[in-house]
Structure formats: structure tokens, C-alpha cells
Amino acid sequence: MRLTSPALLAATLALGAAAASAHPVTYIGTLSNLGEPAAAAGSLGTGTVSVIFDDDTFSMKVNVTFSNLTGSVTASHIHCCTAAAGGGSAGVATPVPSFPAFPSGAGVMSGTYSMTFDMTQTSSWNPAFVTANGGNVSSAFAAFATGLADGKAYLNIHSTLSTGGEIRTFLVAAPVPEPETYALMLGGLGALALLARRRRR
């Protein structure tokens, strides 16, 4: 199949349009003891977080992998919204006392978690966060979305070592390829196809 210039241009424009209209945003972070209370200073705990926040379906998927905690897990949740991006502390925005079914209990120092939340449900929120942000789920959603986008939300894991939190990470938007990146990729694929065609001849 021959990939002509018009076809390449159409494919590039289609991919660029799809990227521009995508509403789910993925936020990521690397867990560590940085920013947690002094009690967590000796922790070597680490982990990764991805949060897929979708303002079309009003859903949020939380994925967490963690290991090497010093204390046993007691709770985990997302806090929002700090006064400044990437620093400080804030109240809990998501369910309290912890994400439902998050690995916890005596001896739990590592684990994985994946859960999708319907953010239209009051059960997906800390009631205090809703009250502090307009008193309804819609206004809480808007405040939380803004906090995420501004880098003012963080996920942390609390433990018996540090009840205020042993490891945390501020959530930042994962890089999204620019349309130019798609164009380069498609151009490269077109060149490879042309080269393969010539070799067959």
C-alpha cells in the first residue's frame, strides 16, 4: 500500500485532532518521604502513582504501587488543595479514612492498588472537602480538577511509622505528545514503507 502525501497529511491531522480533544488527563508521581512529617525521615519507602481524571465521564482511576515502607499501612488518599504547587499540606479530598480496599493492616509494607471512582457519588469524596468547596459534588469536582491541574494535589500513604504520612507525591500531568511528534512518527513510518517497497523491487 502506497502512503501518499495527502494520506500522510490527513492521518497527521486526525491524530492531532484526537490528541487536542482528549479529555481524560493522566497525572503521575513518584512516592517518597519528601514533604512528610519528621517521623517519616528514616523511611526508604517508594512507589509510583498514576491518576486518570476524566471530566467527560466524571470518573477517576487511581493506580498505586508501593514497597519498602518502614511501618504498616494505615491509610491512603489524595489531599487537595495546597496553597502552592508542589509543596505544603492540605486536607483530604477523597474518601476517608482511606481509599476503599487499599492494602493495609499489620505487616503490609508493600502492595498495589487500582480503583475507578465515580466522582458524581458522595462516597467518592471526603464530606469535609465537599462542605469546604461549595457544599455539593459539582463544586467539589470543579475545585479538585483545578487543584490537580495546578499541581496542588498529592497522594500519600500513612503508616504506623508516621501517622501523618510516610510517603507522598504531588501529582503532575503526564507529558502528551504534540501534533508535531505524530507528524514526525508518521513521516518516519512512511519513509520506512517506501524503503521496504524499493528493496522488494
Image (spheres, helix red, strand yellow):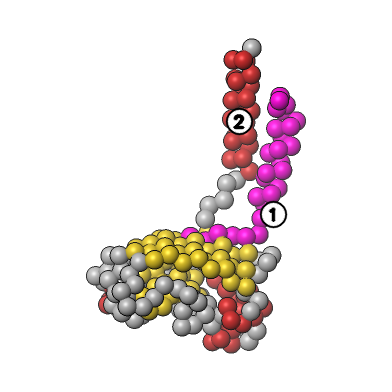
Q: Amino acid at mark 2?
A: Leu
Give the image location of residue 161, x and y in percent.
28, 77
Residue 82 seen from this side: no
Labelled disc at residue 21:
1
Residue sitting at the far top = 201
Residue ID for mark 2 = 189
Front one among 86 and 38: 38
In the rendered image, residue 128, in percent from the top left (x then y), is placed at: 54, 87
Mark 2, residues whose alpha carbon is within 10 Å: few (<14), some, or many (≥20)?
A: some
Q: Nearer the viewer, residue 64 or 6?
A: 64
Q: Is residue 163 above or below residue 184?
A: below
Residue in the image at 36% along x and 75% along y: 73
Q: Amino acid at mark 1?
A: Ser
Q: Is residue 52 magenta?
A: no
CB within 8 Å, label 2 to label 1: no
Q: Which residues are magenta?
A: 1-28
Of the image marks 2 and 1, the number of the one nearer the N terminus: 1
